[in-house]
Image (cartoon, coloured by chain):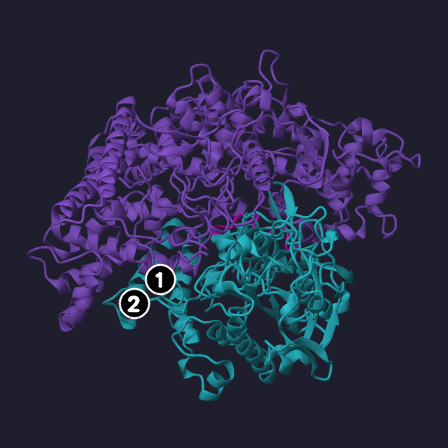
Amino acid sequence: MSGSVGRVHATSTIHALATAATTLALASGLMLGLGLPRASDPPPDADHVDFNADIRPILSNNCFKCHGPDEAKAEGGLRLDTLEHATAPTKKNNRAIVPGKPGESELIKRVSSSDDDVRMPPPEMHKTLTPVEVATLSKWIEEGAEYKLHWSLVPPVRGELPAVKNTAWCRSFIDAHVLARLEKEGLSPSPEADKETLLRRVSLDLTGLPPAPKEIDDFLADTSDAAYERVVDRLLASNAYGERWVRLWLDLARFADTKGYEKDDRRTIWPYRDWVIRAFNSDMPFDRFSVAQIAGDLLDNSSDDDLVATAFHRNTMNNDEGGTDDEEFRSAAIVDRVNTTMQVWMGVTAGCAQCHSHKYDPVSQHEYYGLFAMLDQTQDADKPDESPTFMVGTPEDKAKLAALDAALRDREAELAASVAKNDATDAGKAEVDRLTKARDAARAEADAQRAKLPSIPIMRERPPDQRRTTKIHIKGSFLNQGDPVEPGVPVAYGNLRENQPRNRLGFARWLVDRGNPLAARVTVNRWWEQFFGVGLVETVEDFGSQAPMPTHPALLDALAVEFMDHGWSMKQLCKAIVTSATYRQASRARAECMERDARNRLLWRGPRFRLDAEMLRDSALSAAGLLSSKLYGPSVFPRQPDGIWAMPYSGDSWVLSAGEDRFRRALYTFIRRTAPYPSMMTFDAGSRESCLPRRIRTNTPLQALTTLNDPVFVEAAQGLARRAVLEGGSEPKSRAAYMIRLCIGRTPRAGEAERLLSLYEGELAHYTAHSDIAIKMATDPLGPLPDGMNAPELAAWTVVANVVLNLDETLTKN
Amino acid sequence: MNLFHEKSHATTRRHFLGKFGLGALAFSLLDGRAASAALSGATSDPMAPRAPHFVPRAKRVIYLHMAGSPPQQDLFDPKPKLTELNGQPCPDSFLQMERFAFIKGHPTILGSPYKFAPHGQAGITTSELLPHFQSISDEVTLINSMFTDQFNHAPAQLFLYTGAPRPERPSMGAWATYGLGTDNSDLPGFVVLVSGGRQPDGGKATFGSGWLPSVYQGVQCRTVGDPVLYVSDPPGMDRAGRRRSLDALRDLNEKQAAYFGDDETLTRISQYELAFRMQVSVPDVMDISKEPPEVHEMYGTAPGKQSLANNCLLARRLVERGVRFVQIFDWGWDIHGTGPSDDLITHLPNKCKEMDRPVAALIKDLKQRGLLDDTLVIFSGEFGRTAMNEARNGSTYLGRDHHPHCFSIWMAGAGVKRGYVHGATDELGYRITKDPVHIHDLQATILHILGMDHERLTYRFQGRDFRLTDVHGKVVKALLA
């Protein structure tokens, strides 16, 4: 069992310190007492006691809540987060840590005591150190109690490439790091995935869509060494690339089409979403991408696009509920912006410091309100009109709207004049009718033009003479304000540069400054998680003291440095990852590796995990030939069951989009925060009410019901059935094989087509005998049978398609 | 389905955590209960029943939420002094340092137009608007000293159900199923029933899973349309057809499981089988038409209608079958007096009529079936209402504004005292004078009754061990039987 124990290094030395009798108990004790994420990590990477890997997690989890960076707490005057504090005499004149002398260290005495009155942590914490943890602490003190800065506060550097035996396997620096670790553990990587699997994997990862049959054929036919790289370049150059990656960013940006809270009225902000798609597709450097979103309005000569980008932080919620205090919700929005910014770029949970200095990480409450002050000078103030707003469009379109509005005013004036005449004759009435129609036509024309020119909420700074004075909110309450605070940043992460303004722009540049230890690491880790299912730091949302160590620290740093060196290019980052041998491995399990590392944290095989909510829907529609390739524009309303939208004090309703808008990519689906699209929620998407740094994948019966029965997926099955009949050859077996090809991108393995065929034959007999229901199965809701197709046959193929769309491999990136 | 027990290594924790794609975080801080289950190889289902921290008083919860918040002065907390001072300006002290949602200027006192009388052996005094409640008042603990931090609907509902006023954290039912799993895998463990034609003001976050795995989000069961979304087979497919297609799906998925050796595939196969069973069990539990006439008479139910009465009966049917947490929302209690549809005289009695009979029937029905011994029922709004008439824009209708400082809720069933009144308010019902109970205290108490320590039921997110009760809350021992 102890083999599954993770980061608290169950090294032989430490085991020797713990008694044999407790070994079994401590293995389970680790699980029972803490069960921290690290318990499921792969075996440790080192044999010595290391502060960051071994000691900080123990102190952070058990001690920092009362004896950590929160200076106001520091129970008994003791802090354990720095050597200086931990070795200073306490109020009772003890020393928690006496380097080299565990026997004289009060810390060891306290954590190992059996006396409830003496033992730390105290009983009410419900935490007890295991014998291994006590032994680890003792050994560390014996070795001199060396403290180290938290690894994530030290700017990343690219170290030497590690030496590996199997050099032939390595395609890039990524592989050297991965292989070095595997070799150390006595494991070997998996062979490269077959071409069909690899093509589907990389197509899904880069574009969110499975490969089309022709793309499969082309790739199989191209036997040159560069074939794979050509595919990668093609995918990165497609519009679908931005449409896939925008999803990750919109989760972070909490992008939605409504304002949130009770009324949850509509908000026009989709041009921001389109801006993000374009930014991805044009490979806007991530640093520029970041600065534009935080402070695009403050740039010299800021463009229209820079203004649209600032809608990032206007995705905070507005509360239009009757009887709300606007300042309360303006303040809540600033809090959200501080927390979201620190989350997205720094992987820091700053929110803790809203009420008190952070218990684990170096953000004091004063510093938190320094960040608040940075963002506190914008004009928006929870107003129902969303001001300030910006009209998005070309100068020509804007001029046209002005002209149409002028014409409308003329028509209105003419109508008013005619009505004022009060002429009751037939001619008079006819004149009013005519002018009314003219007015309505002019209005329709102007409105149509206005719809092309949406006004969206953006960031604007208040004028210098209207600056707000930011004060500390005592215990986080905006009604209870304390001392004034100047704009600033938490110093542990680096200071603002001298020449930078102390405002949003300075803040934005600080975030993506090369000296910032976190932004690049946090970003490459997020991207890594998208490809491999788990980040190198599993807690992509937390790089702080409570986070587990990276599985491959040197690789994380190398990727971060590489990212910055390549001009923060997101496409280059993607390309580096997908062209690595690590990524290209087959994903089949190998028993000897499963025993050691079932979660594949050491990357002995390629990634295999379920598609996300958006990819599932897009893949099904794509295989069915129904997916629209239309880019951009207002959000759409695909099929949704009745009764989902029934919110208080709102008459708004879901009206099914017409034509191809029913079949747009999932990212264009209208998101109402209080009643999000239900099938996506079932597949772990969020409500976009707040920043969602990580979707935790689940596997539930409600998901099965969705992909089996949701009319969207039934419609896809009907489309897939028709496509197989039209394009899949005349033989039933080749049609079954074609469905597998469309959904999984490969040829059937032994027995698969046969099993589908036997299902088909049974269903054909069933629907031939029940032609009344056959027509429903084949056409509801997709629509009438195409010419020349018969209902029982198509109904039977629809059932088969429904199965193929629900295959584990269809739902999974393999 | 025992498919995932077939593998010999199904008992290691690491394997267990890899299950369901929940990652290591999922069970990270159930302080050992999940891990114990894993060690014993008992199960690896995130909804499997799990032992609480200590012996529970209740196994399950029915939470009846009157969205909008009923006026305590007109239902549960009689204030003769208000009647005496009716129409007079309220004391100045009511207005100092106060924020109101709608009241402007200096409002006048609004006495209750309804008569109060003591009922039952315990002599709990309640309003004439609740004739049926009189017959169960000996079963309940009435708390007249609830208070909250929030005075707008959405934030107050979120605060009540998630411990925080912004939509981000898991809801009470999600915490309960995260901690305890559920007793019937053929039904969702956390069911939500909505009446009054509207979702709660706080939106789906009031029954969401926040950053807990989405498997713990409340599943809305509906009277109109699919009882659970997508539970019905597509038009043109019957049960036998679904079985045939699932047989093919299983055969093919088993091949794929063998090919990839991915346990997630085995889990998926079992989830499809569970889905198939839910397709029968969900419509069955939602079909109240087979209940005998005397039950319909008792609740005032009418099959096929969306009503609080139907939902009360459904709640009984759900807990009877082992559902862990049933959350009911009934919309329409926001008695502002801006018009006839939210007036104290014309509207409130109608809402009470819709509510009183089925709610009393639910308590009696649970009792006669022995379910009240291990089911906790809670009845509340999200905040209280003012002692003053709102008179928004000079409205001549009568109504009360939002009031966070005191309100009344009641609890009945497992774990709580019977025929007991807790706490008191001042003679004008404006502030609490005795035994205040904060929202976080209520949450701590509910978890305690379910056998869980609110300080130990935690989930690590962004490096912090979060709780339903944030960093507050104490169990109100005086409420416990």
Camera-nearest residue between A809 and A690: A690
Residue at 16 percent across and 50 percent down: it is: A723
Q: Earlier in the sequence, mark 2 or mark 1?
A: 1
Q: Which residue is mark 2?
A: B242
Q: Is residue B58 left or right of residue B92?
A: left
Colour in which chain B is drawn:
cyan
Residue B402: x and y in percent read 61, 56
Q: Is residue A27 left or right of residue A191?
A: right
- Is residue A48 in sight in this rendering? no
Q: Which residue is mark 1?
A: B230
- Residue B434, compared with residue B303, is above or below; it is above
Q: Is residue A782 left or right of residue A207?
A: left
The chain to which mark 1 is attached is: B
Residue A382 located within the stretch drawn in magenta: no
* Element class at badge 2: helix
Residue A654: x and y in percent read 34, 53
- The dominant secondary structure in magenta is loop
Colour in which chain A is drawn:
purple
Kindly identify the amino acid type of the residue bearing the numbered disc 1. Answer: Tyr
Residue A667 found in image quarter: top left
Camera-nearest residue between B93 and A131: B93
Residue B133: x and y in percent read 61, 78
Number of other residues with Cα within 10 Å of mark 1, as a class: few under 14, some 14 to 19, many 20 or more: many
Camera-nearest residue between A571 and B390: B390
Provide the residue span drawn in magenta.
B21-31
